[in-house]
Amino acid sequence: MHICIIRPGALGDTLLALPAIQALREHETIERVTFVGQAAFAPLLLATSLVTSYLDYEDTCWSQLFLPQGIRHPELRALLADCQLVVCWLRDPDGLIAQNLRATTPGRVVVTSGRPGEHAGMHTSTYLASTLGLTLPDEPRLTLVPSTTPQVEATSRFFAIHPGSGGAHKCWSIQGYAEVIQALWRRDIPVLLLAGPADTDRLAELRQLLSTPPPGLLTLLENAPLLQIAHALQHCRAYLGNDSGVTHLAALLGIPTTALFIASDPHTWHPLGRSVQIIAAQELGVLSVSEVLTALESFLI
């Protein structure tokens, strides 16, 4: 069975779709899964056992999903004609996407919004699985093929921290992260600090707040490819971060994860994994350092 999943969006949106693919694989005999999303995520998803091929949603051929004359691109038509199931998690208010896919695909076509919307209070992954008539696996998890390239020399003693997010309103204070890092250093716990392109200003502010770290207690992984980040996270003892794609990645990899929800709804967006704890601000943006450190204590034993 060949299935095609069309799921554009940010990293968190992409990762929260993977448990639904896992559920599909547990219920169907599937030889191929073609995933259509952001090109930057391709190496990571192809390193899992869930996706066998990856296509860039930004390729102009995918714009034909929205054209009244239908899909005419020959390679895209050939791909869709080979699928027994096409899932498109996009809003389709006029039904044009569904019409175009059904005109090209002989198998089942599912077109629906990629977010719960009216299903308020339902987790995004639960919702996505329900659009396929499935329930989530008991333990959603990503398994990566071993890396053949040198990685950051992180060990099981490292505590990973990502103080950024795609939205500034979802971020805990940099002062708070600085105090947590210094508390870890006082216990001789090394920190793997993660930062992406959107985190430049926050990283600069954090480095100004931090004292000079003792030798070996700070490793910075800045603007690294997602697959490299994933391999580094696999070696860490635990992870702390905001509501972000990297936090979802850490949780799905099975890393003990503490996720800080400052503004967004944890019921809909909390990370999935075998060892995840959520700390939600009672007031918008208000979360004490002592509350976070107390929550981390179980990961420091």
Image (cartoon, rainbow, N blue to C red):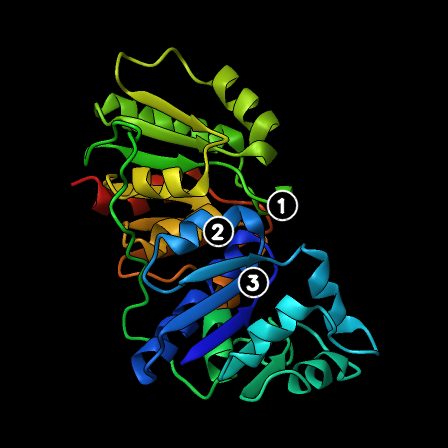
Q: Nearer the viewer, mark 1 or mark 2?
A: 2
In the depicted structure, whether residue 141 falls above or below residue 158 = below
Q: Residue at x 51, y 79 (%)?
A: 83
Residue lying at 33% horizontally and 21% vertically, measured from the top left: 218
Q: Amino acid at mark 2?
A: Ala
Residue depicted at x 34% and y 14%? 213
Mark 3 lies on residue: 36
Could you classify mark 1 by the number of other residues whose Cα lies within 10 Å: few (under 14), some (14-19), or many (20 or more)?
few
Relative to 219, 89 lies left or right:
right
Q: Answer yes or no: do the residues labelled 3 and 1 have beta carbons within 8 Å?
A: no
On the rendered structure, is 32 left or right of 152? Answer: right
Q: Amino acid at mark 1?
A: Gly
Give the labeled residue for mark 1: 167
Q: CA distance from mark 3 to mark 1?
A: 24 Å
**Does 220 sit left or right of 9 as displayed?**
left
- Among the two numbered marks 1 and 2 on one chain, the one whose residue lies closer to the N terminus: 2
Q: Position of residue 159 (x, y in %)?
A: 29, 35
Of labels 3 and 1, earlier in sequence is 3
Residue linked to disc 2: 42
- Quadrant (top left/top right/bottom left/bottom right) for the N terminus: bottom left
